[in-house]
Structures are given as structure tokens and as C-alpha cells.
Image (cartoon, helix red, strand yellow):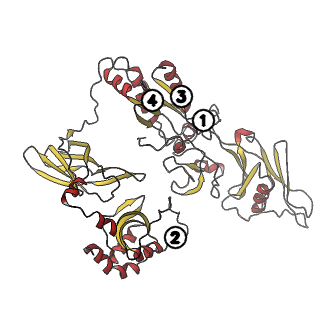
Amino acid sequence: MSPRVRLAATAAALILGFSFAETPANAEPAADPAPAISLGSGEHGLIRFRLPDTAALDRLVASGADLAARPKTDSGAVLADLVVDDAQLAELVKNGAVPVQLIQTEADAAARKPSSKRLAAAADTLTFLQAYWWTTGGRTFLQTQVATTATDDPDVEITVTWTTADGATGSFPLVRFEDSGEYQYHYALPQPLPAKPVRVTATSSLGGTSRAVTPAVWPGATPPPAPAGYQKDFVSAYMTPTDIAARIKRLARQYPKLVDVLNLPNRTQGYRRTAVAYLGDPNAAAVVVESVKFGDQGFNGVQVRTVDPGAKNRPLSASYADRVLTIRLATDDAGKTISTTDDVANFITAKYPQRFRATVEAGSAGLPMPVVAPVRLDDGLKGTEVSKKPWTVQALRIGKVRDGSKIGVLAYSQEHAREWATPLVTLEFAERLLANYATDPATRELVDNVDVFIIPTVNPDGANYSFNDFNFQRKTWSTTAPAPTGTRATGTRGVWTSTGTTRSGRTSTGTSAAARTASPAPTPGPGNCPRRRAAT
């Protein structure tokens, strides 16, 4: 038995007695189910666990757990690689740890025990993706990124060694970086050096060594001068989704041999939402009445009112005629109205499920429902000139050869509605490629050899709302999920239910970017962009 496994065995009693803090009842479930991971009876394995927080890790370490690698964090949770046997695995799972990867078993280790020749053959290959240096504040810094071919091994350790012109040398470790669970590279924050580096190399714990690289000077914020006659500055103002659609159409018409316009399959909800109104005074007692369909689908302008029937012992009743919803309040044997806000809200929702839904305004629960003169339902949208129809998200496909034989590059922007500047960058990039193709050799080489996909806005509904109604809007535009109490009212529409396209496409209430329901959102973002690696 190896020393590590012996240590695990001596710690078994401690680990089996270990427990996590109780998971709060209102905690969100894990985003993804854990893979089925098991060990044979008495078998040891190196397993990566997801722990709820750093406190859980501290308790594990204090219990004597055999921690194999430096813990990593992922979306606020702690990842720890532990050597455990089958009983320890079962106990940890019972107490809240989630096994996410079986890295190696004891049997694997025995089978892989190599000779020095086989070990050399198993060494990974390292490649510098980036090596820059610069000077700021009188100090010199080095920034590097290195990729390993051992992409599936989460415990590969990479070290960068640097050398300056006067022979000074030093080294620093890199950290593994993953995006959506996929390995990208290893990196470190900028490292201070005594002088300009002239050589860097990288080595890994698997025996891999990179070729020596001379770091390049960081280009800085000032771009190099453009070639003579180079055309640029095609965008001079912020652009709404309508402006963007017009620019896409013009570019396709102007450069038909270099551009295809792709209509992406998932249409958006559109710049629209339900119509809503307070029935009563929200500072006293009120019910929020909302249309089931969107306001532009015939519910803007619908009126709702409550009336005293003027008779004794009348039941709560309602009628809907000529676009007016009339609620007749219930009365007692003295003819006094006795319906409460809860009675009215529940009655409206139950009687007209295809037309209206109603909720009690926060602070009004159980209060007597007042007689209210007609109030008008409205969607409250100010962009009257903006089309309310579902939007087709479009992409520009730019290239001399657009048959899939060339390397493809995807650039997309405006996931967040209030990011007005990002579509300007992608559109400027697109038009520079097209306008300079005939005159600039570098541009022509790029367009001839790369299949470029550009989506200027993946969130047109949110952008329209940001431009016309609420310029701090970040998410997409959706009102299909249930809203928290009180957030359907006209005064809180800036926090209505919507979706963050960078939040995996799950529905989120606007009051919390992290709180999610399990219902899918009819929004353009993730469904229109296949698995991709691109900057927004």
C-alpha cells in the first residue's frame, strides 16, 4: 500500500465522523446532477469533490482527510481532490459532498506504473499561448498563458521559468483555468520581474517542457498606424436593434460576394409585455390585475373596476364586457361589502384564467377590498415606434469561402441589454473587413482564410427596453415566469422577470440575478449560440 493510501486509511475514522453543516432548506439545487462515481469494496481512489464552501473544506482538513491537490473554486463552491476508500466515499456523499470526477483508482495506478521510458513517452506537450512583458510605475511585469495537451488531468502543475538579459532567473506556478467545465489554459496574474525578460520556458508535473519563447512587449493601448488608405470609423452613434438590422441588410446588399446573412432559429419574445394596473391604492389596499396575453395583443386599454352591488347578502361576482372587467363585491346581511383583497385576487384568477391573473399587492393581504373606479391596464412601454413582434436574431457570415472548409471564428455582443457600445465594435469590425478587402492585403488574407461569424446583438428585446424605458436593464426581456409578490406592479417593472443570457438560460427574477426557477426562457441568447468560445 502506498504511503498516501496508508495515510488515508489512518484518517478513515476521522473522515467517517466528518459532517458538513446542514444545507439550508431554501438553498438552490446543484445546477447539474453529479456523475455516478463508485469504488469497489476496499478500493481506494483519487476523487474530485465539490464542497459547499471553504468552511466545509476547513472541516475536512481538520478531520485528517487526505487532500491530494490544492483546492480550487468553481462558482463559489470549493473543489477538492481527496484520496478515499469506498466507505469514506459513501460517508462524504451522505454528508453533502458531491463527487464530480474519478481521477484515478488504486488499480489504475498499479497498471500505469511505468518504466522511465514509458514515463518520458507519457509527458505532455506545453505551448505558450501568450507571453508579454511591460513596464509600469517603474516596475517590469510578465504575463503568460500556457496550454497542456493533458487537458483532462485536473492536477497537472505547470511552472514558468524566466531569464533576463543579465542572467537573472526565477519561476512561478500557473493556475488551471476552465470555462463551463472545459479546459482552456494555465495562467498566472502578472508577475513582477527585476528587468525585461528575454526567455521563458514552461515545465509540467507530467514531465512536459515547452520550447523557449522570447516574450513580446505588450502593445499597449495605442494601436499601430493603419495602412495608407485603410477605411474605418463606420459607426458614429449608438445603434438600436432596428439600426443594427438595417446595417446588416445594407452590408449584405453592398458586399454580396463576401457576406451571408444568417437568421438564427430561436426567435425572441419581442419588445412586449403584459398589461397591468393597480386596482385600489397600493399605499392602502390594492390588488394588481395583469393580462395573461401581452398588452399589444388587445389588452392595453382594458379597464377593471370594483363596485358595491347595493344589495344585501350578495356573493362575489364578476362580468367582462366591452373591454371592462367589473368585480361586484360580496355583501353581508346589512349590505356592507365584505370581500377582501385576497378574495378578489383569487376570484379574478380563477374565473378568467385565459384573460387575467391577479395578485395581492405587498402589504395589502387580508384587507377589505375598496370600491375602485375604472383603472386602465397598460404594458407601460414607451417605445411606441418599436415593433412588438418576436425578433429574429441575425448573424453576418463573412468570408471569401463560406462552405465550412475554413477555420470558423464567432464574435457576438450585447448579451447584456445595457451594453450599447459592444454592437458598435462588432459592426465596425465587420465593415472594416468588407470595406478594406479589395485594398488591404492583410484584410484580404484574413477574409480569404477565415469563416467569420458576427452576431452584433443577441439580446435585441432587452436592448430595446434599455434604449426606450430603463437604461440599466441587463437581462433579456421575458415575463413568462411567476413573479414574486408585489413585483408585477407598475412601480416595480424595472425588476420584472427576465433572463440573464450569461446565466445558462435559466429564468431569473429581476430582483436577484442569482435566483433561478427551473423553467426555460423563450429568449434569444443561449439557444441561438451553440457551444462557443468567444468574447462578448
Q: Is residue 231 left or right of residue 499?
A: left
Residue 233 appears in the rendering: no
Distance between the alpha carbons at the discs numbered 2 and 3 = 48 Å
Comes first in the chain, label 4 or label 2: 2
Distance between the alpha carbons at the discs numbered 3 and 1 = 13 Å
Front label number (2 vs 3): 2
Distance between the alpha carbons at the discs numbered 4 and 3 = 11 Å
Distance between the alpha carbons at the discs numbered 4 and 1 = 19 Å
**Element marked by disc 3:** helix
Q: Mark 3 Cα within 10 Å, few/some/many (few <14, many 20+)?
A: few
User: What residue is rendered at 85% in x and 41% in y?
Assistant: 322
User: What residue is rendered at 51% in x and 56% in y?
Assistant: 514
Comes first in the chain, label 2 or label 3: 2
Q: Amino acid at mark 1?
A: Trp
Residue under label 3: 243
Q: Identify the mark at residue 391; answer none if there is no mark.
A: 1
Q: Quadrant of the N terminus?
A: bottom left
Q: Amino acid at mark 2?
A: Pro
Residue 303 on image: x %, y %: 78, 45
User: What residue is rendered at 47% in x and 62% in y?
Assistant: 35
**Element marked by disc 1:** loop
Q: Identify the mark at residue 427; answer none if there is no mark.
A: 4
Residue 365 on image: x %, y %: 71, 64
User: What residue is rendered at 63% in x and 48% in y?
Assistant: 479
